[in-house]
Image (spheres, rainbow, N blue to C red):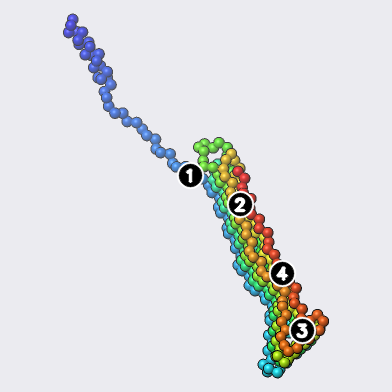
Amino acid sequence: MRCSVLAFILVAVTAPSLAFPLQGGLVARTPNPPPPPPPPQGGNGGNAQTGSSGSANGGSVYQVATNPWGSIYNGYGSAQGGDGGWTSTGNAVGGNGGSVWGPSGQGGNGGYAYTGNSGNANGGSVTNIGGSITNGPYASQGGNGGYSSTGSAYGGNGGNAKREPNPPPPPPPPTGGNGGNAGTGSSGSANGGSVTQQASPWGYIYNGWGSAQGGDGGQTWTGNAYGGTGGSVWGPSGTGGNGGSAYTGNSGNANGGSVTNTGGSIYNEPYASQGGNGGWTSTGSAVGGNGGNA
């Protein structure tokens, strides 16, 4: 009886180990998921820049009597400096940044826009050097200044970005593209031509009716500059793009031409030896772009 009880205890203790041997089991592992694709991004707008325009100055008149006792006589309407022409640059328009219409992404930046500098459009000057100088009516007039201007510059707008509500998993917040900067170049001068007459110490200068007049100043200005608007974000969150900066260049001078007479004696008829009137010079407006909404 004692032997059978001991055998029953041994069987009860060792039965689990006999029925379930302790061995490491193999577990199948699923492969890693592919990384999420990068958020889409709109393409950037192209930059725009115009070249500088050349000069359009009027031709000058330069007369010298080589003999110290020689004389210069200019008949009716002669020896006039040429008027300045027109010089300008075209407009510069930066491209708009591409927009993104999806769960996330970033709108493209607007392109920059800059205009080149415009050239000078000065009126031609008149120089007479001799023993004696005689000008008939409307002779020896400096040319009028022309027109010098730059075109307007428009920075491209930043692209918009849209975010769908509650996308799983949450992507990074979208960002609107920045507006492009805009800047104009400087405009050139449009000064009226000057008149310089130099007689010998014992000579004389005679200016007929309306002669020896300095040219009037022309017009010079810069175009407007408009910074691009920052892209907006249409969704529950995100950051609006920055508005672009705007700069205008300096406008040139538009001074009236001066008259200088030097000699032993000087005689001016009515309306002769008049300095030119000042012209018109201004810069355009500079309007910075608005920041994008979010």
Disc 3 versus disc 1: distance between alpha carbons? Answer: 79 Å
Disc 4 versus disc 1: distance between alpha carbons? Answer: 57 Å
Query: At x 59% / y 39%, what residue is drawn?
Result: 236
Position in image of residue 292 (x %, y %): 61, 47
Toward the viewer: 103 or 153? 153
Q: Amino acid at mark 1?
A: Pro
Task: Give the mark nearest the N terminus, 1 or 2.
Answer: 1
Disc 3 versus disc 2: distance between alpha carbons? Answer: 56 Å
Task: Give the mark nearest the N terminus, 4 or 3.
Answer: 3
Task: Give the mark nearest the N terminus, 3 or 2.
Answer: 3
Residue identified by numbered label 3: 139
How many numbered circles does the render carry?
4
Query: At x 66% / y 58%, what residue is drawn?
Result: 286
Query: At x 72% / y 88%, what residue is drawn?
Result: 263
Query: Is 279 rendered above or below residue 162?
Result: below
SS class of the residue under badge 4?
strand
Disc 1 versus disc 2: distance between alpha carbons? Answer: 29 Å
Query: Is 217 rendered above or below residue 22?
Result: below
Residue identified by numbered label 1: 37
